[in-house]
Image (cartoon, grey):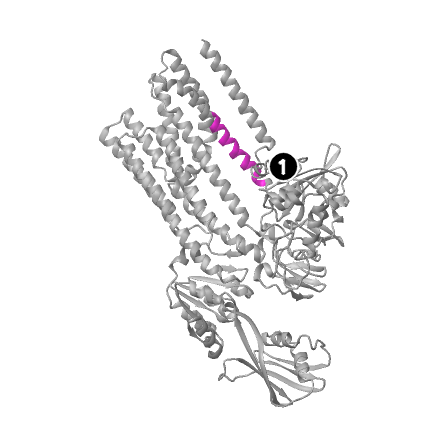
Amino acid sequence: MSKPCLHCKTDIPDGIQSDFCCSGCKTVYELLRSQHLDDGYYALQDATCPVGTKPSKNWTFLDSDSAKSELIQPIGDHFQMTFYIEGIHCAACIWVLEQLQKFNSDVLYSQLDLGAHTLKVGLKTHTFSAIAALVESLGYTPFPLAPGTDVTALNKKTYRRAVLRLGVSGFVFGNIMLLYVAIYAGLSGSLLMQFHWISLLLILPAITFSAWPFYKSAFGALRNKLLNIDFPVSLAILLGFILSVIHLIKGINELYFDSIAGFIFLLSAARFLADKWTQKAHFQAKITDTFLPQYIQKKADHLFEYKPISQLLPDDIIQIDAQEKVPTDCQVIEGQSQINQAFLTGESKAVDVKSGDKLLGGSINESEPLIAKVLTPPKESYLATLLNTPPKTIPYKKDKLSAVFVLGLLLSISGLFLIEGFSETTLSKSLAMIIVACPCAIALAVPLGITFAKTQCHKRGILIQNEESFFRIPKIETIFWDKTGTLTKGELTVDHITWEKEHPKLLEDIATLESHSQHPIAFAIQRYTHPKSAQKSNVQNIVHLPGLGIEGSVNNRHLKCIKSQNTDTDFTMMDVFLNNERVAQFYFSDTLKPESLTVTQQLKAHQQIVSGDNPGPVEIIAKTLQLDWKANVLPHEKQLIVENTANAMMIGDGLNDSTALQTASVGIAIQGSLESSLKAADIILSQGNLMDIPFLFQLCNRLKNIIRLTIGISLAYNLVGLILALFGFISPLAAAILMPVSSLTVLIIAAIGIGKFKT
Amino acid sequence: MMILILLTISLSLAIGFLITFLYTTSKGQFDDLDTPPVRILFDDENHKKN
């Protein structure tokens, strides 16, 4: 019976006699306890708080002179430094990181920005290496940021301007409403016109400054011969303003300054909120930044110095220390180590690398420092291209839809003028129509839905390479499964061995020979014999027989291990020849993943296994799962099968699947996939959990329904509003309030329907 | 006339607040809208749990 770790709350693996799952968690727990911060921390903690790690980085570079000038800001009598912190997201993180002074008395203040993931630390001295090490030992990964280079610095200007625009429009709206209360209450005489004149002065900043983005966007679209939703918005604002000014000069008590101010304010508020949510979702979805280190040691004049990775260029020489992440795709030129590519392939087993091997950006160097040559700038690394493929213009109806809507609106307004003639009531009616008809909701619904869906996927480790998949998945009729590595664990295990002739220590020798092979069969034998033999000695004349096996001399015995051509059996077989005489046969089998049966039963589409494997093993699996099957399928045949099936989904992992993955309407690559498959796939399941597939189906169906619902709601709303306005039942003010409310409805439906979606 | 004086007072107050808003925005008070709402929930430093 396993119990949860006291720190991270994950289950402690069986057989470990401890209250913690790892030493890292124990360290963090004891550290928090030593300062009596544990009660507060664990009360606030949610289930996914950072797991403790071994502090391993050498932070002394932070105390160097170059760091002092580049990273540390002297402020009065103290020094300040900003860190980008990986792994913060909840109240407990703020709680503990803002109390650093309890751990280190030199700390004057530490302030966390949850949105930007930055921590500002003020220190009496400039020994920030101690702070970095402290933060790291608490389980977070800090990255020093040079002043002005942090992730948010660029957006800050735009963001502050948006806040200003919203604030100013709110100020204008509030104060004009205050004056208009008196007007609505029946103010008359000379004061009435004075109030109107003051309103005119008040509204100017809203008309010019706050509404500027609407004009800009409408004009930009017009220049590209497009009509977007900002066109009627701008039209309403300007038309209403001009109309009101004319009335004011003529002395007519029918002005819309209040409606216009309210319209600008509510619309700005809705836009601001939408932008903030989109950015937030986008920030969570854009995991490249958190996957890659911000600084790496770059060689300059024979010395390695920490430089921002953004400055890396091809052919730069960098040093990647143990436990550091590889910043970009590069090639090892010195050193040997193990690399963990679990982020990409889900394979937890570290891969040996040596001089000449390629490293993928984002993988983790596990043991020894490596010197490597940069192959691509970080922005063009494989992972970056994978995650940052510029969002394709969504081939959805939204733009056309709103253009049609705007056009229809303009036509009905001209119709109105034709029938009723030009008068002030007609103008007023058309103003209400324009305001009410804005199909803002349509323009918000689709991108917002996609952003929320993407965030959901990234949280589960599902990487979306092609956003169109979201709309294709609900249409899927047939699912093709690859067998090995997809439905099964992809690990052959030795089922049994038949010996035809007994020879002493033959098994050990076979294992020794196979230890030189990278074939799955060889790994199975390694796992089978593991405790008994590990020596790699006395092997000579090794010949690799590609696709077949390996031969060589072990302890002066000539051994040949080749894959059997015998297809009468349900097992994968290997024949062992000693001096060209068959002495043994190994039987291997592949076991199903534990979730395979549940998943195939949950999926409603027609399913078929297409495997390159022999019929025997395929049939066993197919029978267990009760699926159709095809065996001995060559890669191009796989592609052909998929190509000739409409709305097909291909799920696979191997090199032989990549063309089929590309051809399929939706291609899904699984954990441990080869690079070519990863590139070909629309979606990558980086955790290798097949349960993600039913999840995707449910999520995409939900997305489809939510988008339909929101478009339906906003269309219905707009049509009803339009008709009411046409007959003069809705005043411009009521329209100005109701319209952003419809946009807000859409926002909330999308946020709750998809953002909170759980299976 | 009284109304106009009151109006002047209220408008100058409003403009005063607007200027404060412009100033605080430029100083970055609204840059982080995520952390402060969480931070306010923490217990006081010296508050001891029973």
Q: Residues within 10 Å of mark 1 (few under 14, many from 20)?
A: few
Horizontal and vertical percent for residue A144? 68, 45
Using residue A317 as the reference point, say whether residue A638 is left or right of it.
left
**Could you tell me which residue is drawn at 49 percent across and 59 percent down?**
A692
Residue A250 position (above or below residue A312): above
Residue A161: say if magenta.
yes
Residue A505 position (above or below residue A684): below
Majority SS type along the magenta span: helix
Q: Quadrant of the N terminus of chain A?
A: bottom right
Horizontal and vertical percent for residue A737? 38, 31
**Could you tell me which residue is drawn at 47 percent across and 28 percent down?**
A170
Which segment did they paint magenta?
Answer: A154-171
Q: Residue most toward the left? A: A419
**Which residue has dot 1 on it?**
B43
Residue A267 position (above or below residue A138): above
Q: Is residue A561 visible?
A: yes
Residue A53 position (above or below residue A232): below
Q: Tag 1's secondary structure?
A: loop
Q: Looking at the picture, tell me which residue is in the foreground, A202 or A135.
A: A135
Horizontal and vertical percent for residue A306? 71, 50
Residue A685: say if magenta.
no
